[in-house]
Amino acid sequence: MYPVSEAFLRAVQENTRRYYWTGKITTKGGAVYPFGYEDIVKGSGYVSAQCCGSAEIELGTVYAAEMGVTLFSQIDRYTLDGARVELSYHLRVADGSFEEVPMGIFEVSEANRRLHCLELKAYDYMLRFEKSFNGFESVGNAWAFLELCCKSCGVDMENTRAEIEGMPNGRELLSIYPENDIGTYRDVLFFVGQVLGGFFCINRRGRLELRKYGAEPVTEVQGRHRFSSSFSDFITRYTAVSSTNLRTQTAEYYALETDDGLTMNLGVNPLLQFGLEETRRQLCGNILDDLSVVNYVPFDSSTIGNPALDLGDVLTFSGGQADGEQMTCITSFQCRIGGRQSLKCVGKNPRLAQAKSKNDKNISGLLNQIEAGKVGIHTFTNASGYTVAEDNVRIISIEFAAKEETHVQFFGQAVVDVRAAQVERTASASGSIVVPIPAAGSDAGAGTGEAAGTGDGGEADSTGSGADGSMAGEKTGIGGNGDGAGENEGSAGNGSGTGGSTEDVIVEVELPFSWTEDGKAVAYVTYEFNDSEILAHCPAETWGSGKHILSLYYPIDGLVPNVTNTFNVYLRMENGTGEIGTGGCIASISGQGMAAAAAWDGTVTVEESVSRFAFGGGLGMKGVAGEMGVETMELVRKSYGDSMGKAMIGAFGRPFEIG
């Protein structure tokens, strides 16, 4: 229940009351539009919320509250997308003042304009958590996951760190494996809420709050405060929980000493897959302790209303057909502005919980058929970069198992940044060069020429000698058909030249030269299945410098059921090196009948390389000291240390040290 004064609790139970509603709309642009009770169309406003479905009590739920109202307002509906709406209830108490109870903060999702009014529908901040979760491996306690979700989605946390870590499972280390059913931050909240044994909601101040089912009533609803009511003739209570273990493909069952109630099915919770069996038992046992307080009578009632009541409040009913000794809990409510308030508690009958209907049996059979033909997939993404050179480097490692004898397919792809070795090239250029040389007996000459002519046409007579020599000429002529006379003194030039012919001399030339160019790097791929190298198929690629895509495929037949298999891919390069960045290598193994991805089983593989040493005659002993370092390739940084004392090793021809 929202904290209110004793005067409010007395006033809300009176036969008559005086109250009013107010609200405020704040757009994304910062514009504020307050509205009063007179601005609300009568019977149009409501606030509804729930923490369970329509049939039974649930854990980890993340339902969003809804608000709807119709206002006499001329606000531009196009400015209301994502606007914040704050709604408050004001009740007059005994001293004449009005006590305010906030009803929540909502964000407008839909605004419709009518002729004289504006219809609004809004939801609380729970929808902000509908953002995609990255899906990588994550490790931390419950508070770490809640803090991550709130910071990523812009919502404040109501519970403090001390409150969360003070819960039974609050300090336990939780892990998320990559292959999970988590799609959004809202899914993360759901699974964390299950582990903590409660449910999430957005409170009146717009903050995320974890609430648990309780056993202490907060108020009594008398018969004179109810318009109608219906109560079940059974009590909903839980005495066991069930959780699916993906590694063993079994549903683990944890119960109280007296197991005669309902069983809460937690399903496949990714946060409950890691750790030893004792750890899982402890986690589920703590969840059962929180759930065992549920001892509620399901009901549905229409009351005069108490806006201070909230989800998870434990109530008692008296008068009429109600049993005043039994408790119930609010799992959903709807408070109408200026009208009644509907309260409801859901729950199953323990006596009928074990019976399955015909439809349930048919659905179970269909699910089994689907599961038999379901295609499973195991994926891999490298969490750190690789440098590939002449030695084999394991770039892909996938563990998988099959529930039946089947065949699977491996697909992989890696982006390799290749730097090929530079190669020096040498060559020679040869050819013929033609050199003209003057012929023997030829010399330089000079000549003059003169031309004169008379008559109609004017003929030229020229004499001269010397080819390509200097020439001077004069030409005079008299027109045959005209009276005029003209003289044309030709062009004159001075120059020198070689007279006679030339000879071509051919010279053979050969010139050596060298250059450096990019070579070709060769990449060799080796497949390894269950520590055995596959020799039948060894892919290879030849690349120049630059980024290249390495595509891989290999079919695997005859898998033995219920056995963990390991498929490794190694890469080495000649005449160059290659770099594979983080996330640059992806792979998958898929097929029918695949078992779910198993969590880490605690196996640590350690490899050590020792340089060569000689064996000889004689006997010698010497103290040996060594150091061992362990590097865990995970997104979450961890550390490990070990120390080794001195050990005496004999029967060697010469002393040596292991370093």
Image (cartoon, grey):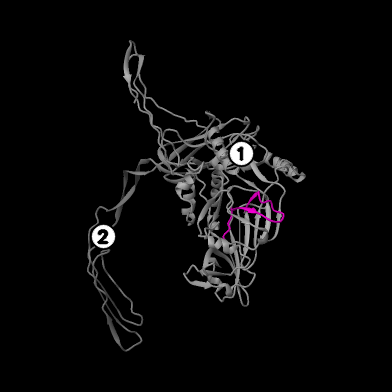
Which residue appears at 32% of the width and 89% of the height?
483
Residue 188 in picture, x, y percent from top left: 54, 48
**Image quarter for residue 637?**
top left
Q: Quadrant of the N terminus?
A: bottom right
Q: Nearer the viewer, residue 467 or 90?
A: 90
Of all residues, the one furthest to the top in this rendering is 618
Mark 2 highlights which residue? 499
Which residue appears at 42% of the width and 33% of the height?
391
Image height of 306 relative to 626, above or below:
below
Which residue appears at 47% of the width and 40% of the height?
542
Q: Amino acid at mark 2?
A: Gly
Residue 49 in picture, x, y percent from top left: 60, 58
Mark 1 highlights which residue? 244
Q: CA distance from mark 1 to mark 2?
A: 111 Å
Find the magenta span and give its range.
Answer: 308-329
Report crowding for label 2: few under 14, some 14 to 19, many 20 or more residues within 10 A (C-alpha).
some
Is 328 magenta? The answer is yes
Q: Amino acid at mark 1?
A: Thr
Of all residues, the one furthest to the bottom in this rendering is 483
Residue 544 in picture, x, y percent from top left: 43, 44
